[in-house]
Amino acid sequence: MDFLELSEKRFTAKKFDPSKSISAEDFDKLKKILQLAPSSVNSQPWIFLTGSSEEAKKRIRPAVADFNWPRLDTCSHFVLIAVRNGLSDKYQHRLLEQETKDGRVANEEAAKEIYDGRQYFINLREQVGETLNWEKKQAYIAMTALLYGASSMGIDSTPIEGFDEAAMDKVLNLDMYGARSVLLVTLGYDAEDDHNRTRPKSRLPQEDIFYDLDKYRG
């Protein structure tokens, strides 16, 4: 299945079959997909908190809007995507250390170029108070990779913004990780009676959203 077919096939699950669970092997693949997600200047400003047990679900449930409880209660696994409270110099050196270990840094000169380049973009965001917003944008990239990666494996998903971020941060003690919550994704296998399974996909026509700048002068 190519990516266009995958895009046509994927839908947001409104209810999962609680009798079906994602295997440990498949969930490891989903974690690898998240690990490999792209980010601006390879900043990787995220952490992922995962759960599958009833205890884990009950722990975060009070922070989730009640209309999203069916997605949480019936899912096999969930992933809470959080971003760091700023990208410290220590964290940047950790990134550079890993890039060197992975063979992306040829020498000390290259290391300095990478560090300085990343620091330039981080400073740009910090100067205008946009660091958190910038990090959140990266979180959405990771989420998209997860949604389509899951679909390619026959796993259904629901992206959720409907939760109280402050409450989620508190219940998961995210201060301990130096992070704050952004997105929740529930994963599993769609229930037979999920009405969204058979509803046709609806998107605006291309003529309403695409403008060819080779022709359009505005």
Image (tube, rainbow, N blue to C red):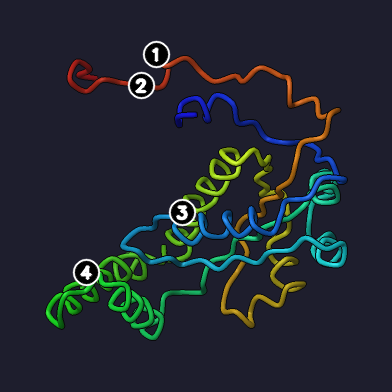
Q: Is residue 187 above or below residue 98?
A: above
Say which label, 3 or 1, has the lower sequence index.
3
Tell me the CA gap for discs 2 and 1.
6 Å
- The one nearer the camera, 55 or 208, is 55
Label disc, if present, on residue 40 of the rendered structure: none
Instruction: Residue at 75% x, 40% y: name it.
Output: 189
Check disc 1 and report the residue beneath it: 207
Tell me the CA gap for discs 2 and 4.
33 Å
Q: What amino acid is labelled 2 in the image?
A: Phe
Measuring from the top left, give residue 210's x and y in whole percent: 35, 21
Q: Quadrant of the C terminus?
A: top left
Q: What amino acid is labelled 3 in the image?
A: Lys
Answer yes or no: do the residues labelled 3 and 1 have beta carbons within 8 Å? no
Label 4 Cα neighbours within 10 Å, binned few <14 / some 14-19 / many ≥20: few
- The one nearer the camera, 124 or 115, is 115
Q: Is residue 211 above or below residue 35?
A: above
Tell me the CA gap for discs 2 and 3.
22 Å
Tell me the CA gap for discs 3 and 1.
27 Å
Label 3 Cα neighbours within 10 Å, binned few <14 / some 14-19 / many ≥20: some
Check disc 3 and report the residue beneath it: 137
Outermost residue on the left side: it is 109
Check disc 2 and report the residue beneath it: 210
State the SS at label 1. helix
Instruction: Residue at 77% x, 72% y: name it.
Output: 171
Instruction: Residue at 50% x, 47% y: name it.
Output: 145
Tell me the CA gap for discs 3 and 4.
19 Å
Label disc, if present, on residue 117 of the rendered structure: 4
Q: What amino acid is labelled 1 in the image?
A: Glu
State the SS at label 2. loop
Say which label, 3 or 4, has the lower sequence index.
4
